[in-house]
Image (cartoon, helix red, strand yellow):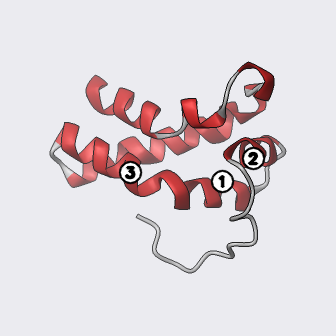
Amino acid sequence: MRTAYVNRELAHLSDEALVALAARSEQSALAELYDRFGRPAYGLALRILRDEALAEDAVQEAFLALWRTSARFVPERGKASTAHPTRPASSRATAR
């Protein structure tokens, strides 16, 4: 889990705005999303996998998938919160 200080200048933005910024390869947007959802995603993955290393891997894979697919997000079709990283993390965790 990331523990370094992160500039929280994007903390006021909605999840949808952050995903839109991530789609434009804004790493700070992904960092903000991680700050919001990393712990819950890790907690869920850890409950499913019961292994810290595997849970960390599942969360890393989920955020990597978010980074890679953020350009496909269409705000008019749904909220970013319905597809936040706890879903992919739990999917990846149950697939192991």
**What residue is at 60 percent from the left and 53 percent from the top?**
33
**Left or right relative to 26: residue 62:** left
**Left or right relative to 89: residue 48:** left
**Left or right relative to 84: residue 70:** right
Q: Which amino acid is tagged 3?
A: Pro
Label annotation for residue 40: 3
- Residue 7 placement (x, y as % from top left): 69, 76
Residue that sits furthest to the left in the current view: 50
Q: Residues within 10 Å of mark 2 (few under 14, many from 20)?
A: many
Q: Which amino acid is tagged 1?
A: Leu
Mark 1 sits on what residue? 30
* Quadrant position of residue 28: bottom right
**What residue is at 29 percent from the left and 42 percent from the top?**
45
Q: Viewer-proximal residue, 84 or 24?
A: 84
Tell me the element at label 2. helix
Query: Is residue 51 positioned above or below 32 on the image?
Result: above
**What residue is at 62 percent from the left and 60 percent from the top?**
31
Residue that sits furthest to the bottom in the current view: 5
In which quadrant is the N terminus drawn?
Answer: bottom left
In which quadrant is the C terminus drawn?
Answer: top left
Tell me the element at label 1. helix
Q: Which amino acid is tagged 2?
A: Ala
Which mark's residue is nearer the viewer, 3 or 2? 3
Mark 2 sits on what residue? 22
Question: In the rendered structure, which disc, 2 or 1, sits on the residue that comes first in sequence?
Answer: 2
* Quadrant position of residue 12: bottom right
Residue that sits furthest to the right in the current view: 24
- In three-dimensional space, the C-alpha distance between marks 2 and 1, rounded to whole angstroms, equals 6 Å
- In three-dimensional space, the C-alpha distance between marks 1 and 3, rounded to whole angstroms, equals 15 Å
- In three-dimensional space, the C-alpha distance between marks 3 and 2, rounded to whole angstroms, equals 20 Å
Query: Is residue 46 positioned above or below 70 on the image?
Result: below
Label annotation for residue 52: none
